Image (cartoon, helix red, strand yellow):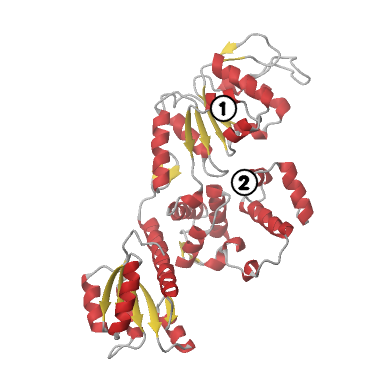
Amino acid sequence: MSSSPAKERILVVDDCPTTLEVLQRNLAAAGYQVFTALSVAEALEILEGTTLDLVITDLKLPKVSGLDMVRHVRENFKDTEVMMITGYPSIEGAVNAVKTGAEEFLPKPFTDEELLSAVQRVLDKLKIRKSGRRALDQVVAVHRGFIGNSEVMRKVFVAIGKAASTSATVLITGESGTGKELAARAIHYGGACSSAPFVPVNCGGIPEALLESELFGHVKGAFTGALESRAGFFHAADGGTVFLDEVSDMSLAMQVKLLRVLEDKEVCMVGSSRPRKVDVRILAATNKDLHGLVKKGLFREDLFYRLNVITIFIPPLRERGDDILLLARHFAGQFAAELGQSPPRFSDEALQSLTSYNWPGNVRELMNVIQRLVVMTDGEVIEVPDLPSLMRFSALRTTGLTRTLAEVEGEYVGNVLASVDGNKTRAAAILGIDRKTLREKLRKTGKPSS
């Protein structure tokens, strides 16, 4: 086990000097700062004068029992966890220890690995609880619409600030649901042209036959159905910003036309031969590896370098640590206010489930989950059973390697689809496949594909 960089402080209470010495040596070797006590009275003196993260106590102690020690810590030191060890293991003793407040019950003899694993589990729970309390106590950190205090997001905020101070083209990358459009808006509204239009365009959501007309406009009679001339998104954004979301979905032919706009600063309406100058800043976003697409010949190299003047990567939610709790608290308050009710609290176990879940749909998925919890939970506290099934432990999901690859894939596809409320475009983006492939996979698994 690697050393603990935070130097968590642990107090070990046992009336056997040999046991104390062994535990002190093993825990210190793992990087913890260790205090020892031969009795509850001695332990109480250390507790009163030292901030501790964990107390490990024997069950059988002279004069005052280990259960009394557990109860004292639980009722007097909210930021200190407790685990119990004993040479007299019994079901009754384990039940009493847990009821009193011990997070772990470890019978002797135990291996070094069993001890260190139990200690790590307890300290992880303490970290979750502290993080949850900080999220409830602190003012939510908001940066131009983003919520977060994590180190990775602070770097994003700095990058957004620098990008906003220039007129350079920016490529924003990151998984679906991380907030790429929010970053684009922050860049636009933090810059010199904040009063000018911000026009978002979902390149993957517009049919290829219509994309050129939508972007650049068309003149009357340019094609069947063009009953009048109409300006495109680039005209509408003149003086401001066009945000090209999922720019990787553009065909190679459209990429050539976009490259010409970037180079010449002018657009030509469909059906017209007269170009028109436009003063537009382009921000683009993708959840795909554009450089990899260039190597495969699916994205123009010259356009890639034109778009990639400044790159900002929005990290996935699973890499943002305690931001998950900040966002959960923010969304809970937001949706509770819409319903005219007080925001619910989250149990420690629910907070741990939220932070340990992988969040394939990122912030968008978290927002959907919290909204569902606020609406559907009857009590004032959200518990683990209130969470979606894919966030809860399931013995059925851990019963050996007996399922076929198709079954495993089908379950994962279903979970991703559920995480985005059935939105097949978003699910396909998360899975890295197109909608046609997703429909085929759903058909094979017997799930609705329409």
Amino acid at circle 1: Phe
Q: Looking at the image, can residue 129 be seen?
A: yes
Decide which of tag 1 and tag 2 comes sooner along the chain.
1
Furthest residue to the top?
274
SS type, badge 1: helix
Q: Name the residue under label 2.
A: 430
Q: Is residue 186 above or below residue 26?
A: above
Contact between labelled residues 2 and 1, with CB atoms less than 8 Å apart:
no
Q: Nearer the viewer, residue 349 or 118?
A: 118
The numbered disc on residue 404 is: none
Quadrant of the rendered image containing residue 104:
bottom left
Dot 2 alpha-carbon crowd within 10 angstroms: few under 14, some 14 to 19, many 20 or more: many
Q: Distance between the residues labelled 1 and 2?
A: 22 Å
The numbered disc on residue 304 is: 1
> Position of 41 compared to 293: left or right?
left
Quadrant of the rendered image containing residue 52:
bottom left
Q: Nearer the viewer, residue 24 or 157?
A: 24
Amino acid at circle 2: Ile
> Position of 251 compared to 153: left or right?
right
Residue depicted at 61% across the width and 68% down the height:
394
- Across and down, in percent, residue 333 comes to 46, 54
Residue depicted at 57% across the width and 33% down the height:
291
Residue depicted at 39% across the width and 56% down the height:
135
SS type, badge 2: helix
Q: In this view, does 239 lie above or below 381?
A: above
